[in-house]
Amino acid sequence: MTPVGRDAPAAVQNPAVAVVFPVKNEGSSLDVAVKSVLAQKVVGGQLEVCIAVAPSDDDTQAVADRLAVEDDRVRVVENPTGITPAGLNAAIQATSAPVLVRVDGHAELPPGYVTRAMATLERTGAAVVGGIQDPRGTTPFEEAVGRAMASRFGAGDARFHYGGPEGPVDTVYLGVFQREAIEAVGLFNESLARNQDYELNHRLRRAGGVVWFDPELRVGYRPRSSLSALAQQFAQYGRWKRVVLRLHPRSLRWRHLVAPTAVVGIVAGLLLGLIWPPAFLVPVVYAGAVAVAAILASRSLVMAWHLLAVYPTMHGAWGLGFLAGPPRGVIRHLKARSKLGENYEDS
């Protein structure tokens, strides 16, 4: 992939770590994200950074080009499709280091993150290691969303949301990969607009690799800033989870069924309650659970008030997205790919 941007830098010699950014409309946060990476210390090697820029409505391209001019460890490539996994693959293919670090344009790596991740890879022999998604809201609403996403009631039992003991898991947030391991399974699936990390980690585990959770690894994350944006985000999560389950039915976990089951139960309870009042118990119990969870998780009355809306939005949007199923044409495209040799467990 040919670098783009003003005065594209030469490749870094003998890099030990490649950090890949898939970015779109990240102009306001990309500078901070990239500089948090460039500040990382890499023992025994060098660092290369590749930013794959999708068509954006802001100054993302200009910021990325400026960063490449300011530091010769940074290069910029195009991601004309705008799809995250396509950007990731373009950035991976434009780098050469044996260790790959995935970072988003709105994330911020803490000092020592790369060093710790490389040590954990070496110690465990894992294909990929990752840690905790650390929500950092800047408004009361964003703080409430972060609180919900970091709770079992809000996001289920995925360990990267709330922490827990170190060890093998089914998926991690972002991820630090052995290049050899992900190249062996075909990189990221470019048919997936969402859930591509989970799907890649599932293929790595099927190939005999280990996905390792290290709670000492934390990456800052900026939650959505409005209820509508949150609903859109979680609806997409639900829809694309259905796509991944069509590819890999054995990747199903109980947490994937909780939200759609709750949606069906609540809607059925409200409708049946019109002719059989005891059915109203289902939505009443759910509303009570939301209220209790909001009180227990909140740090203030304002946060509790927000959580009363945030929890149902997350659950409802994810559940409805899952029930709605894959976006039009996606499954047909995936079947076509399978005929061309893609190796999925149910193709």
Image (spheres, rainbow, N blue to C red):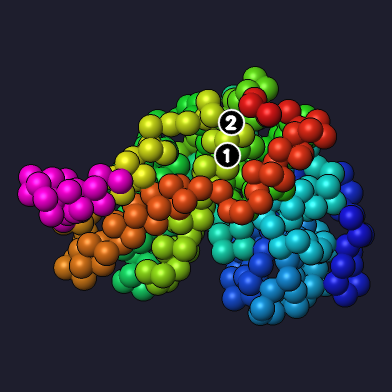
Q: CA distance from mark 2 to mark 1?
A: 6 Å
Q: Which residues are magenta?
A: 264-292
- The number of numbered badges drawn on the structure is 2
Q: Which residue is mark 2?
A: 248
> Residue 270 appears at what percent x and percent y?
19, 53
Residue 280 shown in magenta: yes
Which labelled disc corresponds to residue 244?
Answer: 1
The foreground one among 311 and 318 is 318
Residue 231 shown in magenta: no
SS label for mark 2? loop
Q: Residue at x 87, y 67 (%)?
A: 4
Asked whether, in this view, residue 308 is left or right of residue 34, the answer is left
Q: Magenta-highlighted stretch: main secondary structure?
A: helix
Callout 1 amino acid: Val
> Residue 166 appears at what percent x and percent y?
45, 30
Asked whether, in this view, residue 169 is left or right of residue 271, the answer is right
Q: Residue at x 74, y 53 (%)?
A: 86
The reply to whether the C-beta atoms of the residues labelled 2 and 1 are less than 8 Å apart is: yes
Q: Residue at x 73, y 66 (%)?
A: 54
Residue at the farthest front position:
275
Callout 2 amino acid: His
In what quadrant of the picture does the C terminus appear?
Answer: top right
Q: Residue at x 78, y 53 (%)?
A: 91
Residue at the farthest left position:
277
SS label for mark 1? helix
> Residue 227 appears at what percent x and percent y?
37, 69
